Image (cartoon, rainbow, N blue to C red):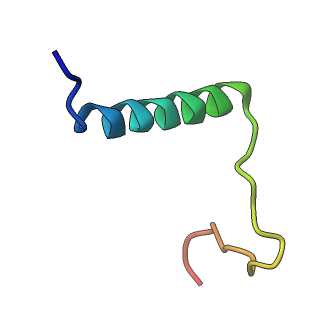
Amino acid sequence: MKKSRKQAPRKLEQQVDDKTAKRVEKGKPEKTNPLAPPINIEAGS
């Protein structure tokens, strides 16, 4: 029985989710763009 092509993207998404979960568990920040402007995370302006 051949594997359907629809299963491949799901596996890829699962791998991405697993990598994200591991990074979050370790507390490693995402790679940020040093040229991007700072983001205001405080409420209000």
Residue farthest to the top, as pictured: 1
27 or 3, nearer to the observer: 3
Judge from the rendering whether residue 27 lies leftward or rightward of residue 11; answer left or right.
right
Residue farthest to the left, as pictured: 1
25 or 45, nearer to the observer: 25
Q: Quadrant of residue 14?
A: top left
Q: Quadrant of residue 25?
A: top right
Residue 2 rendering spot, x and y as whole percentages: 20, 22
Judge from the rendering whether residue 26 lies leftward or rightward of residue 10; answer left or right.
right
Q: Is residue 15 above or below residue 43?
A: above
Identify the residue at horizontal 74%, vertical 81% (top origin): 37
Residue farthest to the front, as pictured: 1
Q: Is residue 42 above or below residue 19?
A: below
Judge from the rendering whether residue 30 lies leftward or rightward of residue 44; answer left or right.
right
Q: Is residue 37 above or below residue 6?
A: below
Q: Quadrant of the C terminus?
A: bottom right
Residue 18 rendering spot, x and y as whole percentages: 52, 27
Q: Quadrant of residue 21?
A: top right
Identify the residue at horizontal 74%, vertical 45% (top origin): 29
2 or 15, nearer to the observer: 2
Residue farthest to the right, as pictured: 34
13 or 45, nearer to the observer: 13
Identify the residue at horizontal 66%, vertical 74% (top origin): 40
The number of numbered discs placed on residues in the rendered structure image is: 0
Q: Quadrant of the N terminus?
A: top left
Identify the residue at horizontal 81%, vertical 79% (top origin): 35
